[in-house]
């Protein structure tokens, strides 16, 4: 597609459940990033993937968060045993190497 | 560690007036600098970027920004604001020469009065 796509656009879940968020980057972009946007914390970096290199996981807030990128394209962010403080908008971005990042529309996660 | 400060949380301007949004960064070398805009319920759209070269950069929608190394600033300007410019604006810094994370400021919400 023309831009970064994310699904679902909205996700409501119960505390303690696991959720998966998906990101389809722009074709040909080798780098993929996940960020979280919440009222209290602003925009926070979570993780990024670059080609076949080991991902930079330095922004993941706890071991309940994980992400994978299959075939150098689609990425899934998984949050296990969700907590209310995980409620946020999760943004995905992609870029060519050393270039600007293009963002998707985000997934709004609400944990009840 | 890199950081970004946007000192103005909320700014209101009249349509047709000029605009300047402030951004100060902290980074050990020459950074990559960006301005993004976010409309309600939308993702982030890139307005402009600075990687190197001319310190005055032009972006989309009539925006420009000037990189001032001596002041560690990258302020965003527009000569005449339109009502459709009402949104939240984020300044961001990235490390040079790498594909790496962006560090964002806390954002400035722009309100435009008619």
Image: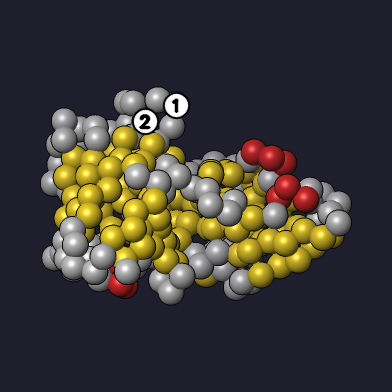
User: Residue at horizontal 33%, vertical 26%?
Assistant: A27
Question: In x, y percent, where is residue A88?
Answer: 38, 63
| Occupied quadrant, residue B71 | bottom right
Mark 1 lies on residue:
A2
Marking on residue A49: none
> Mark 2 touching mark 1, by CB under 8 A?
yes
Q: Nearer the viewer, residue A55 or B94?
A: A55
Question: Mark 2 or mark 1, which has the lower sequence index?
Answer: 1
User: Could you tell me which quadrant the N terminus of chain A lies in?
Assistant: top left
User: Could you tell me which quadrant the C terminus of chain A lies in?
Assistant: bottom left
Q: Chain of mark 2?
A: A
Q: Nearer the viewer, residue A86 or B74?
A: A86
Q: Chain of mark 1?
A: A
Residue B19 as seen in the image, left or right of residue B68: right
Asked whether residue A98 is in view, the answer is no
User: Residue at horizontal 18%, vertical 50%?
Assistant: A67
Vertically, is B39 above or below A26? below
Question: In x, y percent, where is residue B95?
Answer: 36, 53
Q: Residues within 10 Å of mark 2 (few under 14, many from 20)?
A: many
Q: Nearer the viewer, residue B86 or A88?
A: A88
Question: In x, y percent, where is residue A84?
Answer: 30, 72
Vertically, is A3 above or below B38? above
Q: Secondary structure at mark 2?
A: loop
Vertically, is B79 above or below A61? above
Q: Secondary structure at mark 1?
A: loop
Mark 2 lies on residue:
A26
User: Residue at horizontal 48%, vertical 56%?
Assistant: B92
């Amino acid at each position: 597609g023309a831009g970064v796509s994310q699904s679902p656009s909205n996700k409501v879940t119960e505390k303690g459940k696991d959720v998966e968020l998906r990101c389809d980057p722009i074709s040909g972009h080798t780098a993929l990033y996940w960020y979280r946007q919440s009222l209290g914390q602003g925009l926070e970096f979570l993780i990024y993937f670059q080609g076949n290199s080991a991902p930079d996981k330095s922004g993941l807030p706890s071991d309940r968060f994980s992400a994978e990128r299959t075939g150098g394209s689609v990425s899934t962010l998984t949050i296990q045993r969700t907590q209310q403080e995980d409620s946020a908008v999760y943004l995905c971005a992609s870029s060519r190497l050393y270039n600007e990042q293009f963002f998707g529309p985000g997934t709004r996660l609400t944990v009840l | 560690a890199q950081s970004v400060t946007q000192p103005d949380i909320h700014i209101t301007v009249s349509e047709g007036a000029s605009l300047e949004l402030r951004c100060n960064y902290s980074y050990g070398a020459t950074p990559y600098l960006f301005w993004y805009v976010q409309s309600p319920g939308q993702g982030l759209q890139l307005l402009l970027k600075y990687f190197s070269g001319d310190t005055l950069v032009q972006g989309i929608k009539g925006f420009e920004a000037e990189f001032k190394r001596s002041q560690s600033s990258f302020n965003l300007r527009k000569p005449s604001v339109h009502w459709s410019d009402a949104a939240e604006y984020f300044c961001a810094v990235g490390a040079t020469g790498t594909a790496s994370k962006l560090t964002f400021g806390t954002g400035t919400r722009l309100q435009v009065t008619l």
